[in-house]
Amino acid sequence: MAGSDKSDVLNKLAEVLESRKGADPQSSYVAGLYAKGLDAILKKVGEEATETVLAAKTGERAKIIHETADLWFHTLIMLAQTGLKPDDILFELERRFGVSGLEEKASRPRQ
């Protein structure tokens, strides 16, 4: 994929991940995660988030890129498991574009 148009890579990857939902859990890492259920997927997202934070603390560019890619990959699996697509997140980010972070946070319902 190097040198290709990267603007649609999230959607292309999401399609592949979606296709793994029906696959034999023994045939695919992703199918195996789906078979284990949402809790296993969320645990993996948490692990990858921690590894990303630790990589960022080192300041090593290659480690940060590698761990962030792992985090995004597992987050895409989580989105697929919950019936969401990358475009759902991209639309939300676009909606927030040009809105002050303080304004956006203040507009959220209080919990």
Image (spheres, grey):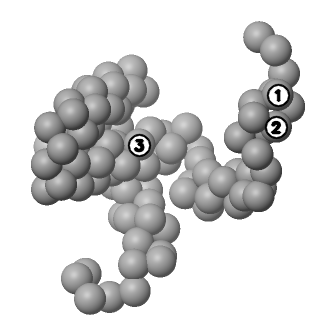
The CA span between labels 2 and 1 is 5 Å
Give the secondary structure at mark 3: helix
Q: Earlier in the sequence, mark 3 or mark 1?
A: 3
Which amino acid type is shown beneath numbered disc 2?
A: Glu
Image quadrant occupied by the N terminus: bottom left
Q: Residue at x 82, y 15 (%)?
A: 110
Q: CA distance from mark 3 to mark 1?
A: 26 Å
Query: Looking at the picture, which amino acid does disc 3 mark?
Result: Thr
Question: Is residue 32 among the parts visible in the rendering?
Answer: no
Q: Nearer the viewer, residue 46 or 66?
A: 66
Density class for disc 1 (Cα within 10 Å; few <14, some 14-19, many ≥20) is few
2 or 3: tag closer to the N-terminus: 3
Badge 3 crowding class, 10 Å Cα cut-off, few under 14, some 14 to 19, many 20 or more, is many
Residue 52 lies in quadrant: top left
**Outermost top residue:** 111
- In front: label 3 or label 1: 1
Alpha carbon separation for disc pair 2 and 3? 26 Å
Find out whether the residues at labels 2 and 1 contact each other: C-beta distance under 8 Å.
yes
What numbered label is drawn on residue 106? 1
Query: Badge 2 is on which residue?
Result: 103
